Image (cartoon, grey):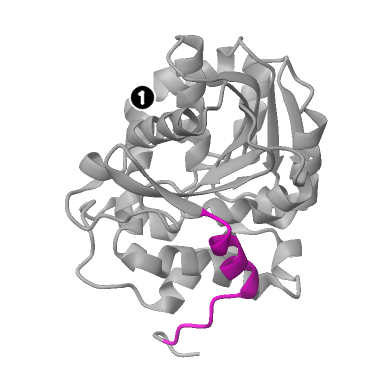
């Protein structure tokens, strides 16, 4: 395949896209997937960077149709809007993303949630947890399940792509990235076991298509400036990580994660000993894609949290 040859959209991604809908929230068009009975209690999922809602397709399937499960594409990701004008500060901040999650929960009438958050979304999730402790969310968090993420940004091991993107302005590129350059963002963040899977190319192709649609390759590099925002508000989010008191918290982490290194999970456990920590030695950065049944079962086991 040459640099500009775009493969077909895999059937599993096309199906996922067809099951969702778009709503206007805070002045922007946001895509979300809402499965299960329309109760006011739900599993509320926050995806990571540079992923999308699709990263949890297998998890949602595992949870099944008897439990309401909501996962949206953040602004700048997947099928949600990807504004070309402005910069990171005007379009994509972690605080803005948290505002959109609050607005979606309010739009759907959610009153209580099991929060699941990964990667960049881990920090968005921690912001929602901080707001919940401050009495500023439309919902109550019954349990927080946090997956690999570099909220403890002082320990992060940046990829080459992240380092290059951070050195550039956070505005949109003048043209799309080559397909192969988008695809190549992903493989090294998976475990060696996952890279050996027969369907590995299909999984990465799904992720790359979620970036590529709506000219998202022009903005994905600028969004990596969220790492700078993590530094600016490090005290707020690390304190929530270490001291969250209003609900149980579970960490699930891939030991082969090259960016959000496993020592981050150990540090949280050391500072908050009551945290449940599960380490997957055969997993990289994407537990919801690499082992969706495990993550789904972990969520199901916590549906009884009060």
204 horizontally vs 161: left or right: right
User: Where does the C terminus fall, quadrant-wise?
Assistant: top right
- Give yes or no for residue 103 being in the magenta stretch: no
227 versus 285 height, above or below? above
Dividing the picture into quarters, in which one does residue 163 lie?
Answer: bottom left
Indicate the position of residue 71 as horizontal and vertical percent values. 56, 44
Which residue appears at 33% of the width and 57% of the height?
A: 221
Q: Secondary structure at mark 1?
A: loop
Residue most extreme to the bottom:
2
Of 101 and 233, which appears nearest the observer?
101
Of 166 and 112, which appears nearest the observer?
112
Which residue appears at 52% of the width and 28% of the height?
A: 109
Indicate the position of residue 208 as horizontal and vertical percent values. 49, 68
100 horizontally vs 185: left or right: left
228 versus 6 height, above or below? above
278 versus 210 height, above or below? above
């Amino acid at each position: 395949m040459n640099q500009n040859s775009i493969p077909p959209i895999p059937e599993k991604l096309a199906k996922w896209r067809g099951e969702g809908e778009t709503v206007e929230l805070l002045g922007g068009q946001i895509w979300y997937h809402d499965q299960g009975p329309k109760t006011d209690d739900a599993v509320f999922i926050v995806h990571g960077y540079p992923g999308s809602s699709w990263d949890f397709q297998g998890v949602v399937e595992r949870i099944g149709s008897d439990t309401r499960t909501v996962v949206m594409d953040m602004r700048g990701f997947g099928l949600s809007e990807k504004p070309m004008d402005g910069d990171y500060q005007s379009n994509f901040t972690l605080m803005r993303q948290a505002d959109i999650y609050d607005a979606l929960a309010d739009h759907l009438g959610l009153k209580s949630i099991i929060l699941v958050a990964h990667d960049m979304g881990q920090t968005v999730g921690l912001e929602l947890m901080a707001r919940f402790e401050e009495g500023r969310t439309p919902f109550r968090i019954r349990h927080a399940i946090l997956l690999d993420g570099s909220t403890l940004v002082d320990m992060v091991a940046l990829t080459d792509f992240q380092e290059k993107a951070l050195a550039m302005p956070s505005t949109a590129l003048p043209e799309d990235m080559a397909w192969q350059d988008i695809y190549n963002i992903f493989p090294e963040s998976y475990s060696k076991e996952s890279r050996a899977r027969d369907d590995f190319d299909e999984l990465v192709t799904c992720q790359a298509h979620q970036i590529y649609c709506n000219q998202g390759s022009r903005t994905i590099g600028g969004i990596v400036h969220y790492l700078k925002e993590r530094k600016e508000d490090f005290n707020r989010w690390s304190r929530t990580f270490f001291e969250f008191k209003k609900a149980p918290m579970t960490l699930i982490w891939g030991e082969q994660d090259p960016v959000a290194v496993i020592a981050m999970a150990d540090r949280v456990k050391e500072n908050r000993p009551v945290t449940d920590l599960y380490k997957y030695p055969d997993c990289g950065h994407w537990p919801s894609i690499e082992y969706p049944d495990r993550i789904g079962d972990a969520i199901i086991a916590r549906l009884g949290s009060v």
